């Protein structure tokens, strides 16, 4: 991606996060984002149509990285020697990435954009949930398969929401343990 595009998007994302913390999502306008970012209206509209598009782009960026199967040495953690098929490590890795975006995710979860963000999270976590169920790493209940998938997915989302609503004071490993305790 062109360096100018990266820089512009970064300015818009930073402004979005700042305005989100200050005003909340429902009161935020594109004009607020423009003022905070210093980006011109025409430049903004070259990249996004609405504030919802900005949120969607931010969410996609977070989830693309968080739910990627790349296990490399990173600033806050190192799972480079782990296998993506070790689900305990994979989930811990996901929780570390969510924690790395703590300020932004906390602001999103405290705003009216929470539902849209959690919807996107559910879409991204569902393939992992399906693998956990297929590999019998979560408790099999005598319920329809779709109900079990949704239950396990909601347990993941509930774990994330609990963690962020309580200031992320517990470690990613502990949150992973809570998730597995609810499902094994």
Image: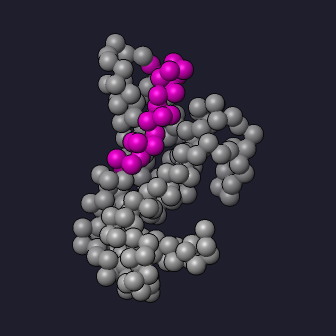
Q: Quadrant of residue 145?
A: top left
Q: Residue furthest right?
A: 81
Residue drawn at point x = 49 percent, y = 51 percent: 63
Looking at the picture, does residue 136 appear above or below residue 28?
above
Range of the magenta residues?
Answer: 118-139
Residue drawn at point x = 42 percent, y = 52 percent: 164
Q: In this image, 77 relative to 133: left or right?
A: right
Looking at the picture, does residue 181 appear above or below residue 124?
above
Quarter occupied by the N terminus? bottom right
Q: In this image, 31 relative to 129: left or right?
A: left
Q: Is residue 93 visible?
A: yes
| Residue 167 or residue 39, whichever sits in front | 39
Looking at the picture, does residue 135 appear above or below residue 36?
above
Magenta region's main secondary structure? helix
Residue 109 x/y as whole percent: 35, 56
Residue 19 x/y as whole percent: 36, 75
Looking at the picture, does residue 41 appear above or below residue 98?
below
Residue drawn at point x = 39 percent, y = 70 percent: 48
Q: Quadrant of residue 111?
A: bottom left
Q: Residue furthest left?
A: 27
């Amino acid at each position: 991606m062109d360096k100018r595009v990266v820089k512009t998007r970064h300015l818009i994302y930073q402004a979005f996060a700042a305005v989100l913390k200050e005003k909340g999502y429902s009161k935020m306008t594109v004009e607020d984002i423009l003022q905070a970012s210093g980006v011109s209206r025409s430049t903004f509209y070259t990249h996004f149509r609405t504030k919802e598009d900005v949120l969607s782009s931010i969410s996609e960026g977070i989830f693309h990285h968080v739910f990627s199967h790349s296990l490399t040495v990173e600033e806050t953690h190192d799972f480079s020697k782990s296998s993506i098929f070790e689900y305990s490590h994979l989930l811990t890795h996901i929780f570390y990435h969510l924690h790395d975006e703590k300020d932004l995710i906390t602001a999103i979860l405290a705003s009216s954009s929470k539902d849209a963000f959690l919807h996107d999270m559910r879409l991204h976590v569902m393939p992992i949930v399906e693998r956990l169920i297929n590999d019998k790493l979560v408790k099999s209940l005598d319920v329809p398969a779709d109900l079990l998938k949704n239950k396990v997915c909601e347990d993941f989302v509930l774990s994330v929401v609990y963690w962020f609503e309580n200031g992320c004071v517990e470690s990613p490993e502990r949150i992973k343990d809570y998730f597995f305790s609810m499902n094994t």
